[in-house]
Image: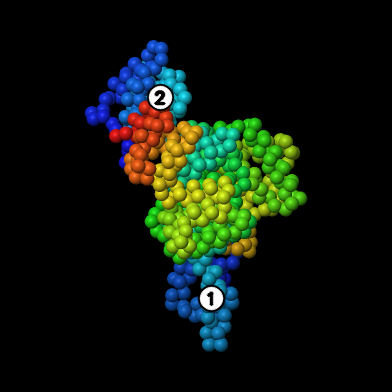
Amino acid sequence: MASFSVPSPVPSPVEDAESLKKAFHGWGTDEKAVISVLAHRDAAHRQQIQQAYEDLYKENFIKRLESEISGDFERAVYRWIFSSVEREAIIAKSAFGKVINYRVIIETSCINSPNELLAVKQAYHARYKHSLEEDVASHTSGDFRKLLVGLVSTYRYDGDEVDARLAAVEAKTLHDVIKRKPLESEEAIRILTTRSKAQLKAIFNKYKDEHKISISKDLETEHPDEFASALRIVVRCISSPQRYFEKLLRVVLTKSNLDEDTLTRVIVTRAEKDLQVMKEMYEKRTNVSLEKAISNETSGHYKSFLLALVRN
Amino acid sequence: MAEECEELTRALSGLGGLGLEEKSVAAAMGRWRRRPEMLDQFRRSFGGLFKGDDGSFERVDMDYIHLLEFELARFKNLMLQWLMHPWERDARWAHHAIHKGDSPTVLVEIACTRTPVELLGARKAYCSLFHRSLEEDVAYHISGSHSYFLVLLVSSYRYDGPNVNEEMAKLEAKVLHNAIHKAAAKGSLLSEEVLRILTTRSKPHLRETFKFYKQLFGKFIEEDLIKVPYIIETVESINSAPAYFCKVIDAALKDGVDQDSKEALTRVIVSRSNIDMLEIKGEYLKKHGTKLEDELQKFSRGVYRDALLSLVAGNE
């Protein structure tokens, strides 16, 4: 369920474009006005507003926006403007810095459905003239490359059919792999990057039934290294994206140094999807509302924008 | 009399050539309707198909019958393949290769000669038909050092546009050259970088890379490639699909080849008939000085031959 509110009736794209033009006018920018429009429109509206703005004023809306606002606020609004698919392509591209942000790649490839991931990859092709796979491959090496390329390349079977016998076999395979030191990644990568989500959930359940410990916990205990940590993110994103994001929010909002990129990413990518559910989980878990937590940790227009997305 | 028997023998010769002369067999049935002694004589004369039993009658040799079944089925298979949507066709060929132990070269062919959209279509069809993903089956059922390479190939969703970064292509030509010559010493060509370049880069980029390879090192990359399964087919089929298909057809038309190779003929003709058949014919003519249609006319029979020729030359 989406977390933000859209006014009813909603202003026409032309009206919104005019409001935004007004907000840009003169010295400085009326950020409040920008937020009051953009944070309260769904993807279809936002697209229409951009088009209306360009038709009316003959200038690229996004470029104008980028020149008017800055910092974390700008980065958040920039990501929000686009449709979900474009946004994830842009966020995936941003993962390629000096060191690859593998968490981002894992999230995109594991949380989306096979067809959604495909759409993201198509948007990536169009935008960057490269495939996501080739960029992931050229920015990684060794086991990380095998894991991440495997995750972004796969087109998993999307149905509910599960082979219970095979799930038991592969749960055992994973258990054997985890118990060995060092971690032999080949089979773990094969299973995690090719099996369907339904099959993987069956494997994880079988693992817990057999060994009384979740595969994630077992990985954490047996292999306190970064690669195993990446594998755990995969497991958690596939098992329950909502629990994964809720925990990520908790971690981000309690660390002393706020990781704005991650906070922005979670809020902006989930606001139109299931942020509402995560809000409820967060409050249940911490006894503090997500809004309050964000309010405590952020400031300025960045804070206002995030809160607008989080409140109904 | 002997002539008629000879004619029927020829019509039913499963050995050499492809297909059967169905018309001749039907004609013989008509001619011999009231002359059962002709068929008796035929049974006695055609030692390949009939063996003496204990002297009382000639029984069929079941090994020969299996051969005939292949030849009888050739048109049916071609027809079914032609009727199918290309995605379903590719998915079923891939499934066959994985589960029936056919040569995995089919997987390389599909992964490298189809456009990214066609390959994706095949993968979708595979999920839909078999309730597994193509890559999961390749990863699970195919073993050996090249298995991972095959998984990467079938999983690829290459950028499909013309943009090529020349500097990168030049650099990667050098990387490939290094890898090939290191492998000559160490014995394994499947280095991380070779896999990355061949399975993730776009095809236009790879063709530029292969061009730079020749420019910088004086040899075509194919010449330098050690016979590591599937790497050379990958390079050839990406470089020029028509030239690659020409090679596959050549192999199918050789005497005494196995069923896999023969079946490749149907697969190539059916799958390329409306894509690059013109270019394939061009390659064939360049290579052999004869027309592909003429070779097919010589080498195949019956309705199967008619179908092949239709798909190769149509009603042009």
Q: Image quarter for residue A119?
A: top left
Taking the spot 47% from the left edge, 79% from the top edge, the residue there is B36
The reply to whether the C-beta atoms of the residues labelled 2 and 1 are less than 8 Å apart is no
Taking the spot 57% from the left edge, 59% from the top edge, the residue there is A179
- In which chain is the residue bearing label 2? A
Say which amino acid is labelled 1: Met
Whether residue A195 can be seen here: yes
- In which chain is the residue bearing label 1? B
What is the residue that sits farthest to the right in this orientation? Answer: B185
Query: In the picture shown, does residue A196 fall above or below B198?
Result: below
Quadrant containing the N terminus of chain B in the rendered view: bottom right
- Please, what secondary structure does the residue beneath circle 1 have? helix
Query: In the picture shown, does residue B253 fall above or below A25?
Result: below
Taking the spot 26% from the left edge, 25% from the top edge, the residue there is A11
Name the residue nearer the viewer: A312 or B214.
A312
| Colour basis | rainbow
Whether residue B4 can be seen here: no
Name the residue nearer the viewer: A159 or B129.
A159
Taking the spot 59% from the left edge, 41% from the top edge, the residue there is A140
Label 2: which residue? A300
Name the residue nearer the viewer: A132 or B21.
A132
Label 1: which residue? B62
Q: How many residues crowd around disc 2 within 10 Å: few (fewer than 14), some, or many (20 or more)?
A: few
Tell which tag, 2 or 1, sits nearer the viewer: 2
Q: How many marks?
A: 2
Residue B71 at what x, y percent from top left? 52, 65
Q: Are marks 2 and 1 on the same chain?
A: no
Say which amino acid is labelled 2: Gly
Residue B310 at what x, y percent from top left? 49, 51
Q: Is residue A270 left or right of residue B115?
A: left
Residue B283 at what x, y percent from top left? 61, 45
Q: How many residues crowd around disc 1 within 10 Å: few (fewer than 14), some, or many (20 or more)?
A: few
